Image (cartoon, rainbow, N blue to C red):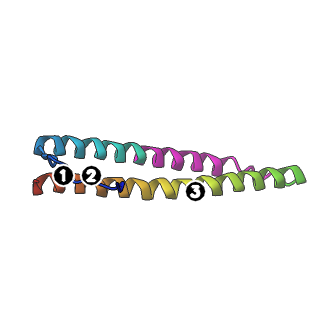
Amino acid sequence: MSVGLMPAANPPVFDSLECVSRSHEVQRLAWRIKACVDQADAVLATLRRAQLDHWLSPAGRAYRTTIAVHASALMRARESLDSAAALVLRHSQNVSVSGERGP
């Protein structure tokens, strides 16, 4: 006996209201991710203000280097979140379109 995918006896029935609701839930997730992007932007702005450019000692340079490393990592994370938000929003549109097509 082979193990494989068996066709469903009863294919799923798509309820348009359920799809709209799911689409809205996915959109809300995208908006929450966008809020994280906004928070990352705020932290990046704070890091820029915390550079202490007037502190010229070796400790000041080390401090600025450390801030720059963390800011760079946060910027990469921010870019990933921004891309994720766009993908999730696009998915929410696909969820609502799949409901319009029907079974």
Helix, strand or loop for disc 1: helix
Name the residue that disc number 3 marks. Answer: 75
Report x, y in % for residue 81: 47, 53
The image quarter containing residue 102 is bottom left
Q: Is residue 47 left or right of residue 55?
A: left
Q: Earlier in the sequence, mark 3 or mark 2?
A: 3
Name the residue nearer the viewer: 99 or 9.
Answer: 9
Q: Hey, what amino acid is under mark 3?
A: Met
Q: Nearer the viewer, mark 3 or mark 2?
A: 2
What separation in Å lies between label 3 and label 2 (alpha carbons)? 26 Å
Q: Which mark is residue 55?
A: none
Name the residue nearer the viewer: 2 or 28.
Answer: 2
Is 26 magenta? The answer is no
Is 41 magenta? The answer is yes
What separation in Å lies between label 1 and label 2 (alpha carbons)? 6 Å
Q: Hey, what amino acid is under mark 2?
A: Ser
Name the residue that disc number 1 marks. Answer: 96
Helix, strand or loop for disc 2: helix
User: What quarter of the picture does the C terminus occupy?
Assistant: bottom left
Q: Earlier in the sequence, mark 1 or mark 3?
A: 3
Q: Is residue 102 left or right of residue 40?
A: left
User: What quarter of the picture does the N terminus occupy?
Assistant: bottom left
Report x, y in % for residue 80: 50, 57
The region drawn magenta spans: 34-55
Name the residue that disc number 2 marks. Answer: 92
